[in-house]
Amino acid sequence: MKKNKSSAVLRWVLGVPAGILLLIAAVCCFAATWYVQTYGKLGFDAVLYTLFSNLSGVQSGLIRDFVLKALLPAVLCTVLLAAVLFFRSDRQLVLHLLGRFRLRLYPFSWPVACLLCVALSGGLLLKAADSVELGDYLYSLNHQTTIFEDRYQDPAQVEITFPEEKRNLIYIYLESMETSYFSREQGGALPSNLIPELYLLAQENVNFSHNDTVGGTADITGTNWTIAAMVSHTAGIPLKTPAGIGGNDFGGSGGFLSGVTSLTDILRENGYYQALMLGSEASFGGRKQYFTEHGIDRIHDYCTAVEDKIIPEDYYVWWGMEDRYLYEYARQELTEIARQGQPFAFTMLTVDTHHIGGYPCELCRDTYDEQYENVLACASRQLSAFVEWLRQQSFYENTTVVIVGDHPSMDGGYFARNVDAGYVRHSYNCILNSAVTQGNFRNRGFCSMDLFPTTLAAMGCTIPGDRLGLGTNLFADTPTLMEELGEETLEKEMTKYSRYYFDHFYFSETP
């Protein structure tokens, strides 16, 4: 009796941890697969940031999608595997060897079931690690780059000269906007141009291109999700997450990249009033922390839109409010800001074209078979209408407008269905009313980090050496780091660990 009781206890001691391990491994595997299918292969840095950053205000559809496509299948898979491995029955499948030996094939003995459970767990964890490129991340931790020591130009050490009459800045991040949506004849990836208004704006104004016509910005590790893109555009560096430190620590007691001097820091020092506007909650992904830490005076988001009665108190769609309300809000606030009589910088981020499938608002037309294409076409029209409104305002003549895609789209399903696998995607860029109109705009090798000094140059600023951060003023004759090193080498350096980065940018006191 005591022996049977001891055996039962041993089975529980072995079986429960093995089952828990299997569940954890299954969740990791399905979650990693879901992440890559949803966001694409962004590198493990991005995964770390997503895991530990503030998820307040995340689109409810993403949570539901994760539960249905990752969490629930993982639980069901675990239950099924556990049922097979730990199945008990008096009837057994036995293999007789040489007439003398009996090998029990099924049901498995308890130790064998536990060993198989551990082995399966290991296989699932390896698949998860491969999906999110954990191996590359661990490799990078043991291989350091010196690109920041060798090439980083600290903006705090550069005497940037502003024109006597300072120009205003409007910086518009278009969610997931890229040049792939142009027609193939125009350098895009599709049969027809989904965003003709955006194409025309780029064609008629300043557009830095990777080809000999309208083109875009290369995608580099550490710059290819929204907050990382905002950091690279405004600070000229990628966003890296230290091992063991989560995204919530950005904006904590140590600040969010408190050792960095960014575009908004520079504008603050030069007397600019600055505002940030989003259609979602600003706290999501560290955006509020970053911009508050670096000189923004006022943040307008979904929450303030409710307070300002742009939308009803109980209104919530997609990530908060759609872009038609965002543009209405922007018109209202820009009108008020312009009356203050001081130079201003207004940054906004659209949301309708976020994956998966985008959000079809009341302004969208049913032109294309795919919802995402209708949303993209609508986004192009809405931006064009907003630009036309800007051009009619008294402040426009002395205002530089920068329009960029924050990063390439993460709607992997759409691109798998519609875009050739070998097509190299680039983010959209266009500068209106630039103080500089001459330069080498075509067949350039550049990334979003180069937009940092380029924006100041477009505002009429003089930058000795034409470099800030790791970025290069694209109006100048100075080659970018990508042009000097090659895209492959620059990409490789961006994936490596940098002690300098964390010592000077992450842990440093505010400059």
Image (cartoon, rainbow, N blue to C red):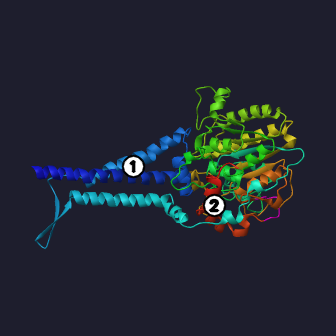
Secondary structure character of the magenta stretch overall: loop
Where does label 2 land, which residue?
A: 500
Q: Nearer the viewer, residue 284 or 69?
A: 284
Q: Is residue 414 above or below residue 316?
A: below
Q: Nearer the viewer, residue 119 or 10?
A: 10
Q: Is residue 224 above or below residue 174?
A: below
Residues drawn in magenta: 472-478
Give percent across and percent down for residue 414.
58, 51
Numbered circle sitting on residue 26: none
Q: Residue furthest front?
A: 509
Q: Residue at x 16, y 63 (%)?
A: 94
Give percent across and percent down for residue 241.
57, 54
Q: For the residues marked 1 and 2, what is the alpha-carbon distance in whole angstroms?
A: 40 Å
Q: Closer to the N terminus: mark 1 or mark 2?
A: 1
Q: How many marks?
A: 2
Callout 2 secondary element? helix
Q: Amino acid at mark 2?
A: Tyr
Give percent across and percent down for residue 384.
76, 42
Cβ–Cβ under 8 Å for marks 1 and 2: no
Where does label 1 land, which residue?
A: 74
Q: Nearer the viewer, mark 1 or mark 2?
A: 2
Q: Is 251 on the left-hand or right-hand side of 334?
A: left
Q: Callout 1: 10 Å neighbours few (<14), some, many (20+)?
A: many
Q: Residue at x 23, y 59 (%)?
A: 111
